[in-house]
Image: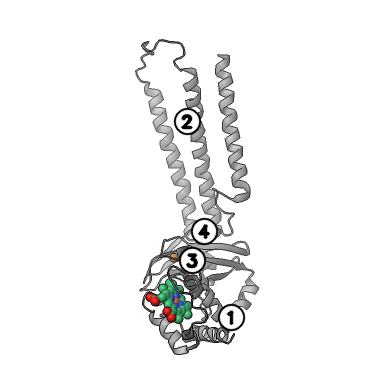
């Protein structure tokens, strides 16, 4: 019996050690836990994660600790191999209990999840619904294009005001492929499906810069399809938005977010175009960008004239040196 308790202590100690090691490991690196939430959606998602995680951890211990103890306690020891063990024939009450408890756990988890789901999908307090900011989000090979109601456009950086609901219309052009929009700190992900808009409502509650990425394997430079979500104080956002129609620095933004990802980052696929004379010819640039060129997809087929002009102007400035 004493040996039984000693082994029990050893097992318990091991479990605690592993648990502490696990926490230390995820602590600074954020490893397996969700990133710290910066929106009401992400907060609700994290609550569901923690709620289900608590049940999962408890069940893990309830199964593994007795399993380890029983393995030691009831091992064969010095008994003959041929000796029969006690013949146990079932225990109705025990069997009913271990059927009922999991069912109950699943019901509790389902109720909690469905209760949270509404706030995750629809974080808008009904009163503030009219004040939504609508942003069109386009996933394209291999960049993100964000369009605001006043005509402002931004590449690979989406700016949102804090404490206000943003309704994102996530889509992809009909000639592109499926992408998927995800900013873990702000909430769930939604697919960008060619020719079809899907809605994602976010309610940022904290300012800051948050990482986003495409989570649908969408081609050779899928891994470069990263972007940033910047949550700004309301007044800073408003002044940015008002000034953004000036398109300052847009050409450089387009070059870095679009052209560079293929032409400088994937030499096995796209040639280096530094100093290519075609870049100095506005008509050629427009033709290549709008229609594609051999293996190059039409990356800017429906860009506005202002966007193409900004790119042409930027490329022209590059060629002089
Ligand atoms: C999705 C990847 C991709 C993106 C994005 C991309 N290109 Fe290309 N580009 C290619 C590939 C691949 C080729 C080579 C096509 C071939 O020869 O089959 C190419 C060829 C070119 C050429 C012709 C090079 C030559 O052979 O003389 C030019 C010029 C060019 N691209 C400019 C641009 C510009 C400007 C942008 C940004 C607006 C851009 N590309 C964005 C993939 C890309
Ligand atoms: Cu993608």
Circle 4: element type:
loop
Q: Nearer the viewer, residue 93 or 54?
A: 54
Q: Quadrant of the N terminus?
A: top right
The residue beneath circle 3 is: 225
* Disc with the residue nearer the chain's start (3 vs 2): 2
Q: Are marks 1 and 3 in contact (CB under 8 Å)?
A: no
The residue beneath circle 4 is: 187
Circle 3: element type:
loop
Of labels 3 and 2, the one closer to you: 3
The residue beneath circle 1 is: 249
The residue beneath circle 2 is: 63
Q: CA distance from mark 1 to mark 2?
A: 59 Å
Ligand 2, image quadrant it occupies: bottom left
Of labels 4 and 1, the one closer to you: 1
Q: CA distance from mark 4 to mark 1?
A: 30 Å
* Disc with the residue nearer the chain's start (4 vs 1): 4
Q: Is residue 243 visible?
A: yes
Q: Nearer the viewer, residue 59 or 93?
A: 59
Determine crowd level at label 1: few under 14, some 14-19, many 20+ residues with C-alpha closer than 10 A: few
Determine crowd level at label 3: few under 14, some 14-19, many 20+ residues with C-alpha closer than 10 A: many
**Image point (57%, 86%), residue name:** 317
Determine crowd level at label 2: few under 14, some 14-19, many 20+ residues with C-alpha closer than 10 A: few
Q: Nearer the viewer, residue 119 or 5?
A: 5
Q: Are marks 3 and 2 in contact (CB under 8 Å)?
A: no
Q: Nearer the viewer, residue 99 or 304?
A: 304
Q: Is mark 1 within 8 Å of ligand 1?
A: no
Q: CA distance from mark 1 to mark 3?
A: 20 Å
* Left/right of residue 22 with respect to residue 305 in the rendered view: right
Circle 1: element type:
loop
Q: Position of residue 215 (x, y in %)?
A: 45, 60
* Disc with the residue nearer the chain's start (1 vs 3): 3
């Amino acid at each position: 019996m004493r040996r039984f308790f000693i082994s029990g202590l050893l097992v318990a100690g091991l479990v605690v050690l592993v648990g502490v090691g696990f926490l230390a490991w995820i602590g600074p690196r954020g490893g397996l836990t969700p990133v710290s939430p910066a929106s009401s959606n992400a907060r609700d998602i994290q609550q569901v994660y923690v709620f289900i995680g608590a049940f999962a951890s408890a069940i893990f211990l309830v199964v593994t600790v007795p399993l380890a103890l029983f393995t030691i306690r009831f091992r064969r020891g010095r008994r003959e191999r041929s000796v029969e063990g006690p013949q146990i024939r079932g225990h109705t009450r025990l069997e009913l209990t271990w059927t009922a408890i999991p069912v109950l756990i699943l019901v509790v988890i389902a109720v909690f999840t469905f209760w949270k789901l509404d706030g995750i999908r629809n974080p808008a307090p009904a009163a503030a619904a009219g004040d939504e900011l609508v942003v069109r989000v386009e996933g394209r090979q291999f960049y993100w294009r964000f369009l605001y109601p006043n005509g402002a456009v931004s590449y690979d950086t989406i700016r949102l005001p804090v404490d206000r609901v943003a309704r994102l219309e996530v889509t992809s052009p009909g000639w592109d492929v499926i992408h998927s929009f995800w900013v873990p700190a702000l909430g769930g992900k939604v697919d960008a499906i060619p020719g079809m808009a899907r809605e994602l409502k976010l309610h940022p509650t904290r300012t800051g810069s948050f990482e986003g990425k495409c989570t649908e394997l969408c081609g050779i430079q899928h891994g470069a399809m990263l972007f940033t979500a910047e949550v700004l104080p309301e007044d800073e956002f408003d002044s940015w938005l008002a000034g953004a129609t000036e398109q300052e620095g847009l050409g450089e933004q387009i070059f870095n977010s679009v052209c560079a990802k293929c032409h400088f980052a994937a030499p096995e696929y796209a040639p280096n175009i530094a100093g290519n004379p075609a870049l100095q010819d506005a008509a050629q640039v427009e033709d290549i960008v709008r229609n594609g060129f051999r293996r190059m997809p039409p990356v800017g087929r429906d860009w506005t004239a202002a966007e193409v002009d900004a790119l042409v102007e930027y490329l022209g400035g590059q060629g002089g040196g």
